[in-house]
Amino acid sequence: MNLEEVELQPWLFQVDPYPEESFSHFLGRFRRANCLSGSQLSAMLGKRPYIVSYWEAPSRRRRPEGEDLKRLSQMTGVAASRFNLMWSSSGTELHWPTRLCARCYVEDPWHKLTWQIASKHHCEKHQRRLLTVCPHCGVAFQLPSYWRNGQCDRCRLPFLEMGGYQGAIRRD
C-alpha cells in the first residue's frame, strides 16, 4: 500500500458529555475543543455546510439520524444512546429563545436540556424563574453551542452573577 492509497483520518479531541447537558451545548464544546466551525464539522460529516447549525438550534427540531448519527458518534466517541439523552422527545414542545437557570449554572456550568422545555417556566431545583435575556442589558442568550465563556455576549455579565435576578416562584 502506498501513501496515496492511505485515507488519512483526522484526529479529534474527545469531549465527555455532562449530566443533563443539552446536545447543542455539547456539540459547541466539541467543536471548540477541536477548533471547528459548524461548517467544517458539517463538511467532515459529508453534509451541507449548514446542517450542524440546524442540529445546534433546538427549536429547529433537527437532529442527526441513521448514518449521520453513527458518523457523529464515531467522530465524537459518544454513543448514539447517550446522544438520545441529550434531546427531548419528539412530542415535547420547546421554548424559544434559549433559557438559563443561573443558579444551576453556578453548580454545573453547562446548558441543561430541561431549561428549554416550554411547559417548564422555572427551575425545579431552585424554584426560580428561568431567564431568557440578560438581566443587565436585556439581550437574549445565544444558542448554548456558542456559550464559550458563560457570560452575556453583549455586556459580558457572567451567568454566575445572574442568579439574583431570578424571581422566586410563588406558591399559593
Image (cartoon, grey):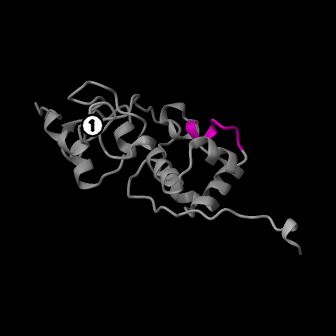
Taking 59 as reference, is 158 above or below it?
A: below
State the residue lying farthest toward the front.
3
x and y, in percent, of residue 34 in the image: 54, 56
Point 82% across, 68% down: residue: 6
Q: Quadrant of the C terminus?
A: top left
x and y, in percent, of residue 141 in the image: 35, 32
Point 34% across, 46% down: residue: 149
Taking 74 as reference, is 31 above or below it?
A: above
In the image, taking residue 97 as reference, residue 11 lies left or right, namely right
- Indicate whether residue 104 is drawn in magenta: no
Taking 67 as reference, is 55 above or below it?
A: above
Q: Quadrant of residue 3?
A: bottom right
In front: 137, or 15?
Answer: 137
Which range is magenta?
Answer: 47-53
x and y, in percent, of residue 151 in the image: 29, 41
Q: Quadrant of residue 171?
A: top left
State the residue lying farthest toward the bottom.
1
In front: 85, or 6?
Answer: 6
In front: 108, or 8?
Answer: 8
In front: 160, or 18?
Answer: 160
Point 50% across, 35% down: residue: 57
Q: Quadrant of the N terminus?
A: bottom right
At mark 1, the secondary structure is: loop
Label 1 CA crowd tier, 10 Å (few <14, some 14–19, many 20+): few
x and y, in percent, of residue 38 in the image: 57, 42
Taking 103 as reference, is 9 above or below it?
A: below
Point 43% across, 41% down: residue: 146
* Residue on which the image places disc 1: 156
Residue type indicated by callout 1: Arg
